[in-house]
Image (cartoon, grey):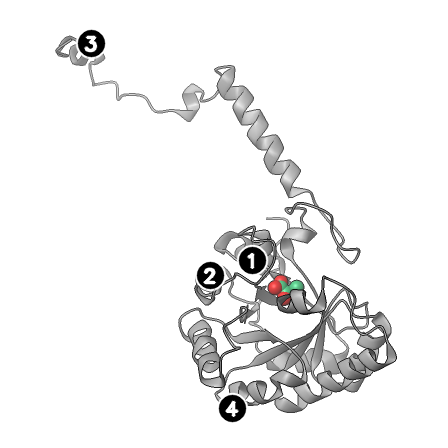
Amino acid sequence: MAYLKPDKPEKVYVPALRAAKEKGEKLVCLTAYDYPTARIVDEAGVDIILVGDSIGNVIHGYGNTLPVSIDEILSATKAVKRGASRALIVADMPYGSYHAGENKAVRNALKLMKYGGAEAIKLEGGSNRVELVKRLVNEEIPVVAHIGLTPQSVHKLGGYRVQGKTEEDARRLIDDAKRLEDAGAFAIVLELVPREVAEVITNDLSISTIGIGAGSACDIQVLVLHDLIGFTFGRQPRFVRQYANVSDVIGEAITKWMDDVRQGVYPSEAESYGLPNDVDLEKIKNALPF
Ligand code: KIV
């Protein structure tokens, strides 16, 4: 297939991110939630697959990420694991799965790693998550942190807005990023933050920044696959660059198939099966009781 990248066969593990940062090499991350998209994303050469809680928006149609359960992420992670052989697989900790005590958070993270095949987990929050990140890292669970716009706090934040626009907020983001690095996170998602703030954080930290709506200075860029391929509904944020229109491709294919069925040209003889020559159809018909 045209998109295959056989020149990048080596499996991506956590240390590869630091090595890439040191060399100034940009990495790429996309979401996937199922076997076929994981295969396509992995075979295209994407370095990191995020089984994001954006599954709530783009797959389940919940409207936000809050209703996503640990079992939904676990099931998606298992499917992604079966489809991906090279990319590092990061599973999102959904809302409620790490908010009710460290032990419960550790158990849920272990579930994603042990039964889902995740190689790291991601959770949202700043300085309020520092102790939890330390604990998870201490239990051999690699952690990606996530600051800026944290969609699980949509009600507290009052919408999906750019974060860190005042001096005080920008300073807090920079401080949170440093504290999360010190706690042991190996990468940090910066979502919807001014590019200047993302650049300061990227230059200050030795762990990788993963930007979404955070400008080009970040070490890694991430997008929701369904946004990139035009398989979502409604208005997109301005950081999304849509490279295909899969919704149209699917809609057109369905329309053509319906037309063919209605005109009697699908299925053709070649698309159906005949009786073997030695089976006598007349005999079968004559034997029928009606
Ligand atoms: O769930 C998700 O897809 C994410 C990315 C937007 C970073 O958290």
Q: Is mark 1 within 8 Å of ligand 1?
A: yes
Mark with earlier residue (4, 3): 4
Residue topped by disc 2:
72
Tell me the CA gap for discs 3 and 2: 54 Å
Q: Tell me the SS state at disc 4.
A: helix
Res 187 visible: yes
Residue topped by disc 1:
55
* Residue at point 58%, 85% (across, down): 133
Label 4: few (<14), some or many (≥20) within 10 Å? few
Tell me, yes or no, whether the two marked residues, 1 and 4, touch with CB atoms within 8 Å: no
Q: Amino acid at mark 1?
A: Ile
* Residue at point 62%, 57% (across, down): 44
Residue topped by disc 4:
138
Label 2: few (<14), some or many (≥20) within 10 Å? some
List x then y, in percent, for residue 46: 63, 63
Q: Tell me the SS state at disc 3.
A: helix
